[in-house]
């Protein structure tokens, strides 16, 4: 048996905050750059188009109405021209791309989801996932997703699945992907790894370390490779946040950057690691390295008791209404 050796790229980049056109240009340019460097799989961070709402962490909802409106305006539709352009580019370059974005609803002007699309090398959307449960203050921006996107795509570069941020803490969501033969697990994250008040005596845990543990558990349990892809707070984004809310300047300046890195099936770090500067990180995954570890721990094979444990996943999409169409009769 010979499986693929895959060059993977994770884009540790800042979006052009609240500007979907400029951010999409950065997406396209980055895909060309990564593909030109030999990447077969190219990953962008959580809600990269066109912002992660960091302001929700430190201001009351009533003070953020203007930012929510701008977030909606800088969001995109899953069936809109921006995603269609990504599909065409994937087909042209024969690459797989995961893009995190703020997704607009066709039936509500004020509904957003934290979403990603996973587009295969043929230009098809293999998975379209909406974050199941927005975390903490994220509930002020995003609606709940559903299970319809919990899908592993079968590409020529391997079987690829992904979860968004805190979903990587959900053991059942992770197992749902493993049970579909996941060989590469993608986890996408926000730009800030540690948001805490400088005046507090007890510092919160470093999310960058926690994120690596979360993804590492998936790698160890599933004997798969892992990608952690965080976005980046550049000077332009920092200025945007501080100009909007000078009273929280210290809060924003004390946020720690998230990290972007890669893990092997043992949870060990391989390839590039980016945290404190923008760039595209690269690594090489030899999927043959996922075979041997399955001999001693195969949670979706011989190392489980499916007669004891049963997992039922509802992959029906959430829709606001179902219509029973009236039948027409010919007199």
Image (cartoon, helix red, strand yellow):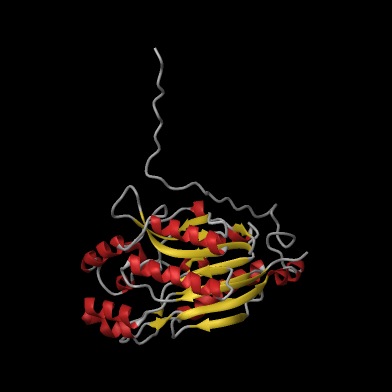
Residue at point 36% right, 81% down?
Answer: 234
Q: Does any portion of residue 131 appear in the rendered image? A: no
Residue at point 41% right, 76% down?
Answer: 191
The quadrant of the picture occupied by the N terminus is: bottom right
Q: Does any portion of residue 262 appear in the rendered image? A: yes
Q: Is 308 on the left-hand or right-hand side of 51?
A: right
x, y percentage for residue 10? Answer: 52, 74
In this rendered view, identify the residue nearer to me: 27 or 329.
Answer: 27
Instruction: State which quadrant residue 263 falls in.
Output: bottom right
Residue 325 higher or lower than 126, as above or below: above
Q: Is 97 on the left-hand or right-hand side of 248?
A: right
Q: Is 306 on the left-hand or right-hand side of 280?
A: right
In this rendered view, identify the residue nearer to me: 141 or 159.
Answer: 159
Residue 274 higher or lower than 136, as above or below: below
x, y percentage for residue 148? Answer: 50, 51
Residue at point 69% right, 67% down?
Answer: 4
Residue projecting furthest to the top = 331
């Amino acid at each position: 048996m010979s499986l693929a050796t895959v060059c993977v790229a994770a884009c540790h980049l800042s979006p052009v905050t609240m500007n979907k056109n400029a951010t999409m240009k950065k997406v396209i340019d980055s895909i060309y750059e990564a593909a030109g460097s030999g990447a077969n799989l190219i990953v962008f961070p959580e809600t990269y188009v066109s912002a992660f709402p960091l302001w929700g962490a430190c201001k009351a909802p009533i003070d953020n109405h203007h930012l929510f409106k701008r977030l909606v305006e800088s969001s995109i539709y899953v069936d809109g021209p921006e995603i269609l352009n990504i599909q065409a580019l994937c087909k042209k370059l024969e690459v797989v791309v995961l893009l995190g974005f703020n997704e607009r609803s066709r039936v509500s002007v004020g509904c957003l989801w934290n979403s990603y699309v996973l587009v295969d090398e043929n230009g098809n959307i293999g998975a379209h996932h909406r974050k199941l449960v927005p975390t903490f203050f994220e509930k002020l921006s995003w609606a709940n997703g559903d299970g319809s996107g919990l899908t592993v795509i079968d590409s020529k570069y391997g079987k690829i699945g992904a979860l968004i941020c805190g979903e990587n803490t959900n053991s059942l969501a992770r197992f749902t992907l493993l049970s579909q033969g996941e060989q590469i697990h993608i986890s996408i994250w926000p730009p800030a790894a540690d948001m805490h008040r400088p005046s507090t005596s007890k510092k919160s845990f470093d999310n960058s370390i926690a994120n690596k543990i979360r993804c590492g558990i998936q790698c160890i349990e599933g004997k798969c490779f892992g990608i952690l892809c965080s976005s980046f707070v550049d000077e332009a984004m920092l200025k945007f946040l501080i100009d909007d809310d000078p009273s929280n300047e210290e809060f924003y300046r004390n946020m720690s950057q998230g990290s972007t890195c890669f893990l092997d099936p043992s949870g060990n770090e391989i390839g590039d690691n980016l945290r404190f500067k923008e760039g595209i990180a690269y690594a090489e995954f030899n999927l043959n390295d996922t075979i041997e570890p399955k001999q001693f721990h195969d949670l979706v094979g011989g190392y489980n008791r499916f007669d004891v444990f049963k997992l039922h996943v509802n992959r029906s999409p959430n829709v606001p209404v179902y219509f029973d169409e009236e039948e027409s009769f010919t007199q």
